[in-house]
């Protein structure tokens, strides 16, 4: 089963609103993992686990809102170019 099929089944089973709240929860867990690392109480393994969960939810959000991968890539490249300009002092 591919990702899109899994995402469709998750939305069918738990509902759109529940999946939106799950995305919020996963993103909050990244914040918590980073805070723990700053305090030297966390681990990179914990952060990695949180990032994987969040990435799955990001893909599910893209599926739910019908945002093409190409569009995300396009916007990401714009943001990376902006970051590069900031780093170069432009």
Image: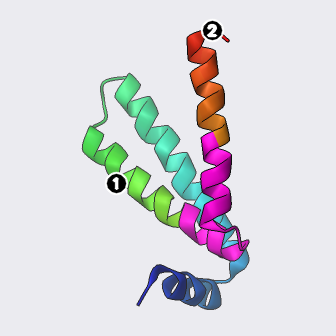
2 or 6, which lies in front? 2
86 or 10, which lies in front? 86
Residue 19 image offset from top left, x and y in percent: 63, 72
Q: In the image, what residue occupies the spot 68% across and 48% down? A: 75
Q: Which contiguous range is marked in magenta?
A: 58-77
Q: Quadrant of the N terminus?
A: bottom left
Q: Quadrant of the C terminus?
A: top right
Quadrant position of residue 24: bottom right
> Is 40 inside the magenta-drawn segment?
no
Residue 42 image offset from top left, x and y in percent: 31, 35
Q: In the image, what residue occupies the spot 60% across and 54% down? A: 73
Quadrant position of residue 80: top right
For residue 89, the mark is 2
C-alpha distance separating marks 1 and 2 = 35 Å
Q: Secondary structure at mark 2?
A: loop
Q: Is mark 1 in CB contact (under 8 Å) with mark 2?
A: no
Residue 40 image offset from top left, x and y in percent: 30, 24
For residue 49, the mark is 1
How many residues crowd around disc 1 within 10 Å: few (fewer than 14), some, or many (20 or more)? Answer: some
23 or 41, which lies in front? 23
| Among numbered discs 1 and 2, the one appearing first in the sequence | 1
Q: In the picture shown, does residue 45 fall above or below 19?
A: above
């Amino acid at each position: 089963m591919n990702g899109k099929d899994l995402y469709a089944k998750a939305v069918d089973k738990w509902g759109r609103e529940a999946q939106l709240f799950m995305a919020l929860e996963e993103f909050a867990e990244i914040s918590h993992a980073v805070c723990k690392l700053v305090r030297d109480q966390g681990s990179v393994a914990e952060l990695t686990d949180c990032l994987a969960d969040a990435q799955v939810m990001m893909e599910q959000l893209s599926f739910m809102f019908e945002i093409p991968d190409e569009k995300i890539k396009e916007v990401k490249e714009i943001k990376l170019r902006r970051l590069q300009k900031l780093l170069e002092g432009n």
